[in-house]
Amino acid sequence: MAQVAEEFGITLRTIRWYEDQGLISPERRGQQRLFRPRDRVRLALVLRGKRLGFSLEEIRTILDMYDAEPGETGQLRYLLEQIHRRRAELLQRQRDLQQTLAEFDELEQRCRDDLGRLESSG
């Protein structure tokens, strides 16, 4: 398990958590876990999903759809819907950040102007 943790740049605790959550299910041999290619793919998908901002429940839905009906087609449709929703959220956040930055620019300029007036008159 330590090798898998190092390979994916995560902690052993994270691997155990994903296993407890049913996102991965490595074969157990006593205290040892055997990570098959399927487990590694699922782990990589979980980590990618987290980087993209998906919740563990959303990731679980996507992963589970592959193994059950409606299969890969349903999985891909669901994923496309989630991508669209996530992109819309990120674009809104981007607009909000741009507006906040513009307000900071305006406030900074006013502070500089006020400071310049105070220093030149004092």
Image (cartoon, helix red, strand yellow):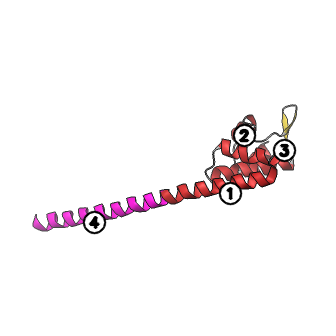
Figure check: 50 above or below 114: above
Instruction: Tell which tag, 3 or 1, sits nearer the viewer.
Output: 1
Q: Is 120 within the magenta?
A: yes
Instruction: Tell which tag, 2 or 1, sits nearer the viewer.
Output: 1
Figure check: 122 above or below 9: below
Does residue 45 appear to the left or right of 34 in the view shown? Answer: left
Task: From the top left corner, tell me how far across and down residue 58 is, in percent.
Answer: 67, 45
Say which residue appears at 69% left-offset and 41% top-offset.
14
Instruction: Tell which tag, 2 or 3, sits nearer the viewer.
Output: 2
What residue would you read off at disc 4? 109
Q: Quadrant of the N terminus?
A: top right
Q: Is 76 within the magenta?
A: no
- Disc marking residue 18: 2
Q: How crowded is the residue under tag 2: few (<14 C-alpha within 10 Å), some, or many (20+)? A: some
What residue would you read off at disc 3? 35
Give the secondary structure at mark 1: helix
- The amino acid type found where label 2 is placed reads Tyr
